[in-house]
Image: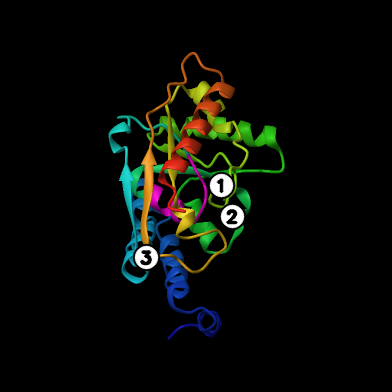
């Protein structure tokens, strides 16, 4: 039998959220295992969610530009419109560490499970400190053979909108010499930010040619990423 306190908590959680709760608990038990196992186990939740979206909502996706993926891990700079891409990128760039606001790490269970994946938490209240953290920890993750995933706009933007592209990923590229891989997608047109309802269809995720950081300044790299992503957004939009 479940302890009374846990039983009361579960009674307030229903359906998919209850499974989420249990998966977070199970993930915590991977703590003693090596990173590769923790990563594999915890990200099965992403795989399940993508399958569940297809089965229950008729929401699928296709990947274009896979031939552009370099042989070695690099820096992924991706458009941010939805919760969807945080899961889908886990299937494409393996293993990865992504940049996130440190407040997420403080969420009971969910945040603790996130911590086991070695993300790069940043303090968004200080721009200079955030860039320093991304460069320092990003280089460490790249040296460990992991992709570094960054959403340069910092937060989710609505379809048709363009946020400010922060240059932290470009700074990491110039300091590490790693290639930058721009990624565009139209997930927000099917699963919008702060929206529970999903629209059936096929999301397009497009991977661009790697950008070599050698001989380029952060501002130039950031500009190339932004122009490529935003030009692709116009092509793949279904609106």
Is residue 81 magenta-colored? yes
Q: Residues within 10 Å of mark 2 (few under 14, many from 20)?
A: some
Q: Residue 25: horizontal and vertical position, in percent?
A: 45, 67
| Between 155 and 232, the one nearer to me in the picture | 232
Residue 53 is labelled as: 3
* C-alpha gap between disc 1 and disc 3: 24 Å
Q: Considering the numbered disc 3 on the image, is that residue within a helix, a strand or a loop?
A: helix
Question: From the viewer's perspective, is the residue at label 3 or at label 2 nearer?
Answer: 3
Q: CB under 8 Å between callouts 3 and 2? A: no
| Between discs 1 and 3, the one toward the N terminus | 3
* The residue stretch that appears in magenta: 78-89
Q: Name the residue under label 1.
A: 100
Taking the spot 40% from the left edge, 34% from the top edge, the residue there is 144
CA–CA distance between discs 3 and 2?
24 Å
Q: Is residue 228 left or right of residue 64?
A: right
**Mark on residue 130?**
none
Residue 80 magenta-highlighted = yes
* Kind of element beneath mark 1: strand
Find disc 2 in the rendering and name its residue.
Answer: 104
Q: Are marks 1 and 2 in contact (CB under 8 Å)?
A: yes
Q: What element carries label 2?
A: helix
């Amino acid at each position: 039998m479940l302890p009374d306190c846990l039983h009361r908590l579960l009674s307030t959680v229903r359906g998919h959220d209850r499974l989420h709760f249990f998966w977070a608990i199970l993930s915590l038990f991977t703590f003693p295992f090596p990173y590769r196992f923790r990563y594999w186990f915890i990200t099965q939740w992403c795989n399940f969610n993508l399958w569940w979206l297809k089965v229950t909502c008729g929401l699928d996706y296709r990947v274009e530009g896979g031939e552009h993926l370099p042989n070695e891990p690099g820096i992924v700079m991706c458009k941010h419109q939805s919760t969807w891409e945080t899961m889908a990128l886990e299937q494409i760039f393996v293993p990865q560490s992504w940049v996130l606001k440190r407040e997420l790490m403080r969420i009971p269970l969910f945040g603790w499970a996130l911590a086991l994946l070695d993300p790069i938490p940043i303090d968004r209240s200080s721009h200079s400190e955030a860039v320093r953290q991304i460069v320092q920890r990003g280089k460490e993750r790249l040296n460990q053979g992991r992709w570094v995933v960054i959403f340069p706009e910092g937060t989710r933007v609505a379809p048709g909108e363009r946020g400010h592209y922060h240059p932290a990923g470009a700074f990491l590229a110039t300091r590490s010499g790693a290639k930058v891989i721009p990624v565009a997608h139209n997930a927000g047109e099917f699963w919008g930010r702060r929206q529970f309802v999903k629209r059936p269809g096929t999301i397009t995720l497009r991977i661009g040619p790697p950008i070599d950081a050698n001989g380029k300044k952060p501002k130039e790299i950031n500009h190339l990423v932004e122009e490529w992503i935003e030009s692709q957004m116009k092509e793949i939009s279904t609106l």
